[in-house]
Image: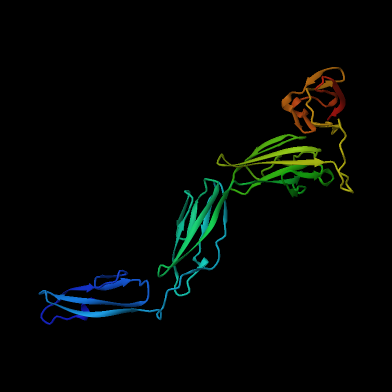
Amino acid sequence: MGVSVFIDLDGAINAVEVQNLPNWLKFEDNTFRGTPPQIGNFTMTLRAIDDDGAWVETNFTIVVDNQGRINQRPILRKNIPDVIGLYKQPFILTLSDSSFFDADGFINRLEITGLPPWAQYRKGEIRGLADAVGEYLISVRAFDDEEADVTTTFKIIINYPTVLFDLIQAGKPGQRFLIKRLKDKETLLGADLPASLNIYANCDAIFDAFDLSLTGPYTQISTTDRSPYALFEGDGGFVPTAGYYFLKGTAYLRKELIASTNYQFEIVPSDAITKQRIPIDDWAVYPNPCRDFVNIKLPYNMPLKQYELATLVGQKVIIPDKLVFQTGTFVSLNLGQLNIQAGIYLLKIQNEDTSWRVFKIVKQ
């Protein structure tokens, strides 16, 4: 506006001043800028001053009404869903401006607040290495081409990774198959299981090594850094003996702990046809004959003082506590660690009242 309104025949317009300028309006570099807060007529006086200090004035009025185009605020077209990430894993989330809509313009930019310390927003993406577990409330503010805005929120949820266990029929290649994915505190019917079992582990995070351990009626510990991440290598496995088992899997990436999960499951004897449980008698010793492990069913959760093996000619072998695993009313004895020969033995168990119970077992 400014200098084109006025002319000086013998010189030049040196300056233009405005009087009665409303608060919402600015006049800089001969240009009016501002956003009217209300409708109405706003009259001002323009004074033009030439290079000799002479001046001339004129009035003009800005009319603000609601007949012209009013910028429409952008709207939220669709909610941004909560996002789940994993601890110590790369996190990448692309935020699309298609979540928002501007009827009379376009979405010009997004402003993100509430990001965790490990994350950054750049070029439409939230990125980072999630080095802390927790929930983070993220605010996304979308601006249109005239700086009107709309805001929405969503959560970033970072959880610890989970170790998953698959129950496998053990055997040579071609004989192995998946029985089921184990659930914590699951009960398995013996009649539904094959003669030998293996357990494969996996993780919902990136890993390169696994520690696996099984305790209960059978004990096995393994460390592996190649697939399949199995409790037993090759065609190895364990016999599905009745009792409670405790399974632990720990995943590593470049020797750093990524995830650790503990499961418990139970194997119970069952009828092959009716699938009904078959009770185990108190003081039952099984399997008999046995290989590396023998199990005893107690009448109740009772402490036992000592376990011994004796040959038929009277030689005794004390079973140390580290080879005894008791869960509730089930006791498992790891005979494989005793380095004893195959043969017939007398298993002697000393009760808490110092009395003894004696059972004949066959070690294969």
Q: Position of residue 333 (x, y in %)?
A: 78, 29
- Quadrant of image for the N terminus: bottom left
Residue drawn at the location 49% of the way across and 58% of the way down = 139
User: Is residue 297 shown to the viewer in this render?
Assistant: no
* Residue 232: % across, % down: 71, 39
Total marks shown come to: 0
Task: Report whether 254 appears left or right of 27.
Answer: right
When asked about the image quadrant of residue 211, the answer is: top right
Decide if residue 132 is in sight here: yes
**Residue occupying the far top of the picture:** 314
- Report the residue that reaches farthest toward the right: 273
In the rendered structure, the answer to whether residue 274 lies left or right of residue 124 reads: right
Q: Residue 20 versus residue 74: which sits nearer the camera?
A: 20
Residue at horizontal 14 percent and vertical 80 percent from the top? 8
- In the image, is residue 270 above or below residue 64? above
Q: Position of residue 36 (x, y in %)?
A: 35, 72
Q: Residue at x 25, y 76 (%)?
A: 44
Quarter of the view holding residue 33: bottom left
Asked where in the image residue 290 lies, by quadrant, the reply is top right
| Residue toward you, 204 or 43 | 43
